[in-house]
């Protein structure tokens, strides 16, 4: 009998042990002051590349401070869900990367450490960062939810061989010139410009900039969704019309979501792409630095600037600290390390991005023409996506509307002002009621 | 279960055989009765934890106002009474409209997919019943889709369905010359068919396996007797095989129905986060409503509605099929 009892006790405690680990999940956030868990977003051409870039730096940090950083690189497709899960369970990493457009959405969950004056002081103060990058760290007037880590902006990349063959001597600067160049390039199965019609975030970035150029925004000043204004409708139509009316985008692009437009570009099938810092991807596709050129993203007329001359969103990656961290001191040290001038130069160089830290930006590496365009865009003509808590929903519903419109265009169905407005109307009604 | 039912009588017999074994053995007898329950306890606890608790949490969530503002501390989110449900079933507004459309799409999809899975599985199982050279190989081959990891299999299909570089269009358009221009499979209306092909490809081996197992239980001499009476293959299938498979088919169709109706992996891997309207299956739709638009309350309400629907359908199905069996038995 005793043996039975022992067996039963064993079985019950075993099941309890299972349940305990099942609930715990046990990642990061341990009380140990000597370790940190870091979720890095996927910046390089693969997760392995990221590990290779980051691990030596983490080792150096451990050498300096004695704090070991456990690294996990998370693909973009999983990152937001992973963060949400961590938010609801309270079991997350100590430090994480977030896409800067999510700052306000994630800020509203209350899961991220607010960067008040004291915390900012611990990493050298707010003034070290470029203004445009700080513009996408949370709702204006609140303490930032994150600090900028890598900055990017959109620019127009063009295929030199295809431009030469079509007899185009200088890169287009306005949308009319894009259309003209596109028409020259579109022939024999080749296309003028590439889009990623099924990539919701990319769709949002593009129509946001076009909306700015039409003097519109997707949110009112007090943060209410406003997707159906004339400017917003015109912006979405203009973007989809690259395929539907201008026919300078190959119909196949409507189903692209995995950067296929970049490989088309590298294979001399597409003449132009609007992209943020693709040099690493071009290189991995076998394109040398002399095979492509870069110019500021197009504007309605004249030169890029602010307001209607905006030609990019402020793209980039921010670094946030999870509020639940048991090692706040260590986390602040790590953020300070990652935003230090030396690390900023090293990491941004490795990823082909621009440092959001003013002093690091002065390094000659970033004066290279391909990066200077991005640096100047960020300084003079980029606008941050609406910093409202509903930004994440906006990306989903409007991004999906644009995807559906591209599907219509690809199938040869007409895309009209009415059909665009109807899609945007539907998207707006899907937003949560305030 | 059967063991608990069987043990007590034998125990009673043992006890009766040892006269005067008053208190001590009886207590140990009681313990023995408790023992199976104790052994079940771990499983019960886990079941509770893995299924019941999340279900109850989901039901609770469906009555709460859960958005990005309250998700972190969801247990303290404000109650919203039936608001989430009214939003979900307001068929005049986009959210309800989309849910209803997705529901009908899923119904149609499930009926066609389950029907094809059942038909293909049964046909294959019956034709592989006779022993012939290469039967083992074919049986193994047919089970490959069932054995492959879903993600790997579906992502391969996604590549094959790509418009410009995919194998499907290469064969259909380039080699067979069907259509003026290559068709889209991953966006637009054709996506329904693409999803159906993958779903059937993935689902029929299970039907094949189940029917094959069911066939083992049909006595061979029934066929022999039928053959002696002059029944051909079709008559044998109609009058012996199919009626004998009745109970197997009952379970098979129910399970396939539930799996297909709830399938999330296939559309998610094939289309990504936003499925095309024509292939907007309800599970992915609910996922998008909760996790992509951060409207967790409404998403939970939709899940509860789906659960209720599936419970009703399953209940009615079981009622009909078991009643049908009783009358046919009589």
Image (spheres, rainbow, N blue to C red):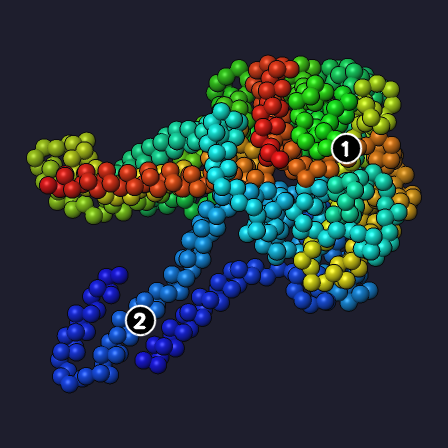
Residue A86 makes an appearance in the image? yes
* Residue found 73% across the figure and 37% down from its top: A387
* Residue found 54% across the figure and 21% down from its top: B182
* Residue found 13% across the figure and 80% down from its top: B17
Image location of residue B233, percent across then percent down: 18, 33
| Chain letter for the residue marked with disc 1 in the picture | A
Instruction: State whether residue B118 is above or below residue B181.
Output: below
Q: Is residue A219 left or right of residue B192?
A: right
Rendered-image quadrant of the C terminus of chain B: top left
Residue A338 makes an appearance in the image? no
Between residue B30 and residue B83, name the one nearer to us: B83
- Confirm whether circles 1 and 2 share one chain: no
Residue at the spot of label 1: A313
Q: Quadrant of residue A223?
A: top right
* Residue found 73% across the figure and 15% down from its top: A183
Q: Is residue B200 left or right of residue A233?
A: left
Q: Is residue A305 left or right of residue A415?
A: right
Q: Quadrant of residue B108?
A: top left
Rendered-image quadrant of the N terminus of chain B: bottom left
Numbered badge on residue B35: 2
Image location of residue B328, percent across then percent down: 14, 38
Q: Secondary structure at mark 1?
A: strand
Image location of residue A304, percent across then percent down: 85, 25
Instruction: State whether residue B102 is above or below residue A8.
Output: above
């Amino acid at each position: 009998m005793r043996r039975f009892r022992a067996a039963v006790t064993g079985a019950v405690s075993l099941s309890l042990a299972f349940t305990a680990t099942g609930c715990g999940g046990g990642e990061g956030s341990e009380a140990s002051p000597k370790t940190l868990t870091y979720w890095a977003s996927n910046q390089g051409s693969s997760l392995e590349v990221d590990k290779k870039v980051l691990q030596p730096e983490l080792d150096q940090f451990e050498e300096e401070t004695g704090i070991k950083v456990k690294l996990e690189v998370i693909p973009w497709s999983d990152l937001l869900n992973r963060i949400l899960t961590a938010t609801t369970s309270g079991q997350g990493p100590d430090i994480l990367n977030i896409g800067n457009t999510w700052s306000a959405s994630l800020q509203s969950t209350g899961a991220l450490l607010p960067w008040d004056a004291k915390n900012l002081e611990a990493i050298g103060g707010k003034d070290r960062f470029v203004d445009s990058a700080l513009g996408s760290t949370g709702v204006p007037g609140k303490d930032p939810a994150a600090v900028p880590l890598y900055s990017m902006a959109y620019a127009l990349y063009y295929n030199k061989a295809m431009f030469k063959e079509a007899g185009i001597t200088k890169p287009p600067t306005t949308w009319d010139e894009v259309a003209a160049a596109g028409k020259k390039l579109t022939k024999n199965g080749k296309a003028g410009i590439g889009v990623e019609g099924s990539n919701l975030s990319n769709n949002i970035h593009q129509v946001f900039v076009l909306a700015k150029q039409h003097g519109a925004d997707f949110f009112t000043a007090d943060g209410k969704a406003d997707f159906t204004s004339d400017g917003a409708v015109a912006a979405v139509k203009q973007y989809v019309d690259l395929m539907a009316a201008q026919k300078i985008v190959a119909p196949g692009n409507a189903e692209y979501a995995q950067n296929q437009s970049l490989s088309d570009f590298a294979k001399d099938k597409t003449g132009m792409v609007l992209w943020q810092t693709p040099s690493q991807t071009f290189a991995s596709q076998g394109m040398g630095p002399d095979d492509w050129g870069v110019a500021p993203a197009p504007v309605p007329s004249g030169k890029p600037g602010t307001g209607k001359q905006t030609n990019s969103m402020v793209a980039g990656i921010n670094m946030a600290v999870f509020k639940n961290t048991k090692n706040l001191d260590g986390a602040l040290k790590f953020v300070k390390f990652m935003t230090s001038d030396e690390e900023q130069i090293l990491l941004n160089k490795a990823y082909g991005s621009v440092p959001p830290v003013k002093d690091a930006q002065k390094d000659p590496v970033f004066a290279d023409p391909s990066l200077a365009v991005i640096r100047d865009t960020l300084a003079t003509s980029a606008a941050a996506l609406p910093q409202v808590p509903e930004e994440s929903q906006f990306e989903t519903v409007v991004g999906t509307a644009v995807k559906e419109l591209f599907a219509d265009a690809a199938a040869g169905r007409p895309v009209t002002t009415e059909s665009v407005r109807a899609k945007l109307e539907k998207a707006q009604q899907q937003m949560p009621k305030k | 279960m059967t063991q608990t039912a069987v043990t007590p009588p034998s125990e009673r017999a043992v006890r009766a055989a040892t006269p005067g074994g008053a208190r001590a053995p009886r207590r140990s007898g009681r313990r023995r009765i408790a023992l199976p329950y104790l052994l079940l306890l771990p499983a019960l606890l886990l079941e509770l934890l893995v299924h019941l608790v999340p279900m109850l949490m989901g039901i609770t969530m469906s009555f709460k106002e859960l958005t990005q503002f309250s998700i972190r501390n969801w247990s303290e989110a404000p109650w919203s009474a039936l608001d989430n449900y009214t939003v979900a079933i307001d068929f005049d507004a986009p959210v309800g409209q989309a849910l209803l459309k997705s529901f009908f799409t899923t119904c149609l999809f499930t009926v066609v997919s389950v029907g094809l899975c059942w038909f293909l599985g049964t046909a294959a199982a019956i034709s592989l019943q006779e022993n012939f050279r290469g039967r083992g190989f074919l049986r193994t081959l047919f089970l490959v889709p069932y054995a492959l990891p879903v993600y790997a299999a579906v992502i391969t299909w996604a590549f094959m369905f790509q418009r410009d570089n995919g194998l499907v269009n290469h064969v259909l358009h380039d080699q067979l010359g069907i259509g003026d221009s290559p068709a889209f499979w991953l966006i637009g209306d054709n996506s329904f068919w693409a999803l159906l092909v993958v779903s059937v490809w993935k689902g029929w081996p299970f039907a094949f396996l189940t029917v094959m197992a069911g066939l083992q239980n049909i006595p061979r001499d029934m066929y022999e007797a039928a053959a002696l009476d002059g029944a051909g293959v079709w008559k044998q299938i109609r009058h012996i095989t199919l009626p004998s498979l009745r109970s197997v088919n009952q379970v098979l169709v129910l399970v396939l129905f539930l799996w297909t109706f709830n399938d999330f992996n296939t559309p998610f891997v094939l289309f990504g986060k936003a499925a095309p309207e024509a292939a907007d299956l309800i599970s992915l739709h609910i996922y998008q409503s909760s996790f992509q638009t951060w409207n967790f309350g409404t998403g939970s309400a939709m899940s509860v509605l789906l659960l209720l629907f599936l419970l009703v359908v399953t209940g009615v199905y079981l009622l009909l099929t078991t009643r049908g069996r009783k009358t046919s038995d009589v």
